[in-house]
Amino acid sequence: MNTVDMRPVAGCHFRVELADGNGRSIEIACSEVLFPPLSARPDSSEAHADEHLVLRRATSADSALHDWWEKTRRGRAPQRRTVRVLLLAPDHERVVKRWRFRNARPVTLHYAPLNAMDSTLVMESLAIAFDGV
């Protein structure tokens, strides 16, 4: 008999993938994912202009988010991309829940302030518009 595990799952085990529309995808290391409100309205498959998915992480030599934003800014990004967010079980293997954001495109890229008097990490945040979830 197949039983469903009803225990709550912590939000700290997740994976973010960026698909390029050609069958390839890369994993994007993120420390935080901010979901927009997901409506239950019949027309909820369409996102509103002010609702964005936000990917946040500490800045590093990995320039995947910046490169995607830069290509979009210059009009050279692929037309269709999909962002997948996978919530993982504590074993880090099983997927408990998944969200797929279709026709995703960067809207804004934001960096935390630089401060010579503070040793905190520099965070980068990419706001992403999408056509459907």
Image (spheres, rainbow, N blue to C red):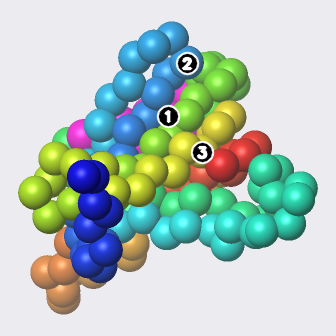
Left or right of 48? Residue 116 is left
Q: Is residue 49 above or below residue 81?
A: below
Q: Is residue 54 on the magenta stretch? A: no
Asked where in the image residue 32 lies, by quadrant, the reply is bottom left
Which residue is more in the foreground, 131 or 61?
131
Is residue 66 shown to the viewer in this render?
no
Asked where in the image residue 50 lies, by quadrant, the reply is bottom right
User: Which one is closest to the eye, mark 1 or mark 3?
Assistant: 3
Is residue 71 shown to the viewer in this render?
yes
Instruction: Identify residue for label 2.
Output: 21
Magenta segment's dominant SS is: helix
Q: Tell me whether the residue at label 1 lies in contact with that at label 2, contact meaning CB atoms closer than 8 angstroms.
A: no
Q: Is residue 80 above or below residue 122?
A: above
Residue at the spot 18% in from the left edge and 86% down from the top edge = 118
Q: Position of residue 86 (x, y in %)?
A: 37, 50
The secondary element bearing badge 2 is classed as: loop
Instruction: Identify residue for label 3.
Output: 101
The secondary element bearing badge 3 is classed as: strand
Which residue is more in the foreground, 22 or 120?
22
- Amino acid beneath label 2: Gly
Instruction: Identify residue for label 1.
Output: 68
Disc 1 to disc 2, C-alpha distance: 14 Å
The magenta span reads 62-71
Disc 2 to disc 3, C-alpha distance: 12 Å
